[in-house]
Image (spheres, helix red, strand yellow):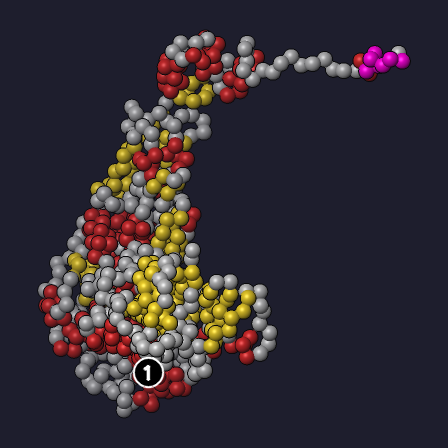
Amino acid sequence: MDHYFALGFQNAVAYIMPHNTRFEKGFLAQNYAASQRKLSSFSVYVTPKPWLNFADCAPQTTLEKTMSSSSDTAKQLILCDCLGSQSIDTTKIEDVTGLKCSKLHTNLCTQQSDLATKAIAAGNVIIACGQEQARFAEIAAEIGADLPVFVDLRDRAGWSADKLSQAPKMAALAAEAALRPAEPKVRDVTSDGVCLIIGAGEVAVAAARKLQDTLSVTLLLTDDSAPPVTGGFDIIRGRLTQASGSFGNFNLRIDAVQALEPGGRGQPQFGAARDGAKSQCDIILDLTGDTPLFSAHEKRDGYLRADPRHAPSVADAVFAAAQMVGTFEKPLYVRLEPALCAHSRAEQPACSNCLNACPTGAITSAGDTVAIDPMICAGCGACSALCPSGAITYDAPPVDHVFRRIQTLAETFRKAGGINPRLLVHDDTHGIEMIQLAARYGNGLPADVIPLEVTALAGFGHAEMLAALGAGFACVDVLLSPKSDRDTIDRETALAQAISARTIRLLDMADPDALSDLLFQGSDAQAIATPMLPMGTRRQVARTAAKALTDADVIPLPDTAPYGAVLVDTDACTLCLSCVSLCPSGALIDNEDRPQLRFQEDACLQCGLCSNICPEKAITLQPQLNLTDAAFAQQVLHEEEPFACVECGSLFGVKSTIEKITEKLAGKHAMFANPDTVRMIQMCDNCRIQAQYHSQNNPFAGAERPRVRTSDDYLSKRKDH
């Protein structure tokens, strides 16, 4: 039997009432808003502590924020040479980008902060400073102005040992900053501060004592240590056997759970153990030092884990838990179009790229498609890069915005006089730190290396790499971070290299000086003479870029590629067309007029469903990228002559199949011992029904129909007649 218990009632007032009870106007009705926990047949509504802002405890809602992505050329670029430590060509930047540049300041963050305040108050500005973003954001908040856009020209361009002009790169970075991305969609997540601390001994007890005044704490002891006599938190003993969910909505199952008996003299004792206890909490603080409760635990919001033997780690986890009360915005990182998903058809497996790559387990199988739990998704982007059909696309920011950034950087650099730019892709943590340290203490970045910051490094897949090369970059380098999803990045890089026939380097290093030295070695790669415009879906962009980068008609690809052809063994194929009926992308097509299997290569996802369900094992996949127009045409893979009905002459079925069936059944099966029944095999549907109905010993025939009774029949039986 399942038992329900509520965690963390020590520091809250619990009102217990039947489920049907409705709140009337009053304090409880207006301010209950904290949490609802199941306890037997009652709902427990817990009012938050007096100092909590009730507005922060609003029920969970979905907030859809959408803004059009556009470039705002009316913005003013506020420039500063940072105490004369960098050279900025304001005229070049203004002429190339169309942005209105301010006069060149030298100490905008301190002595000239009044000028920054005036510019921010005027609005529509881009401040060319990355280091002091917090300072300028604070100024905007104080004067009630909109938050300005920031672009780091100093660390990414100005501070460099390269003697070549940095103006083309600065212009490119400024133009990119002027692009206005769509506001990400978010969902409100409410945490009432219900916290479960798991651990043993004094370390767990000390953590509970530190958090008891901030959170509603329940301590789950995992050993036989004596519990504290007094404390402002609940204490139980047991074994956590199951945990699911995420921040604000963890679901727990605890076996051998024992509640602490507060009464009695001497050492407090625990009650009887019970299995199957269930509850919920908002935060989990794991101090066991054992195996994490979740895969990729560092990506699971609300789950904090620390080694109990390392006091600083425990202190950091306790501090982080104390901040997790209120309403928070959870970005919705990816968008799913179930109709495009090629995961499965008719319970037959096909594509599972996203399931295999998701580190957090946010993606699960849901029949013919997949389902994504947005509260568990950590936004790594691997699913978007690997999805062959585009059913899953990254949405924070959208993929098309990344394409526009790439195109803007390359185009502006060329327009400003730069040649053969190199793209350095990096994440928003490790990569930024590496560039900042290299600029401040080392040689910085070369003038032709343009950094591109992305939030999801694994989401920068082969389509984005090809888009960069096709847009005019001579080469692409990807600076990996210690937490990068290396498997996905390796796979996508190999695919991009196979298509482009160019080397794409993965830079796995943590030394800023080594990064600078490697980049200053230069590259012999040349940008293409006629860049392409990266527009459309990821598949369309990849194909367009490939045509711009190579003269080959057909490019062989790795086995995991999402492009390719289908090969059919015509000797084994019976044209049953089961592959056609289940093909998720419509790449396999039949012909209504004759037995024929057609194929359109551009639509093939190489999901493998056709080869999996073929009863004759006549289908194999051939990964390749066909850049000719033939990829858009329907090609006949296999066809045969239809069979003519022996009665009416209409065409039906496959001639070879009908002949094989006739040969195997005629005179060899009890139901086809009669030549008339054998002949039915060679009839179309209509003629077969007619022949069956009118045949002798028809199994569908009934008894002779009785004579219709009339009035004379009834009258003849009356005695008065």
Query: Which residue has dot 1 on it?
Result: 136
Q: Position of residue 601 (x, y in %)?
A: 32, 39
> Label 1 sits on what residue type?
Phe
Tell me if residue 629 comes above or below residue 162 in the rendering: above
Identify the image quadrant of the C terminus: top right
Percent position of residue 249, x then y = 40, 65
| Direction right: furthest residue | 720
Q: Quadrant of the N terminus?
A: bottom left
* Residue at figure coordinates x 32%, y 36% from the top left: 612
13 lies above or below 237: below
Membership of 64 in magenta stretch: no
Residue 156 position in % (x across, y down): 21, 72
The answer to whether residue 147 is visible is: yes
Q: Nearer the viewer, residue 285 or 342?
A: 285
The residue under the point 27% across, 77% down is: 206
Foreground residue among 155 and 677: 677
331 to 31, vertically: above or below? above
At label 1, counting other C-alpha atoms closer than 10 Å, the crowd grade (few under 14, some 14-19, many 20 or more) is many
Q: Is residue 633 visible?
A: no
Magenta region: which residues?
714-720
Observer-nearest of 355 and 101: 355
Give the residue at x 81% y 15%.
714
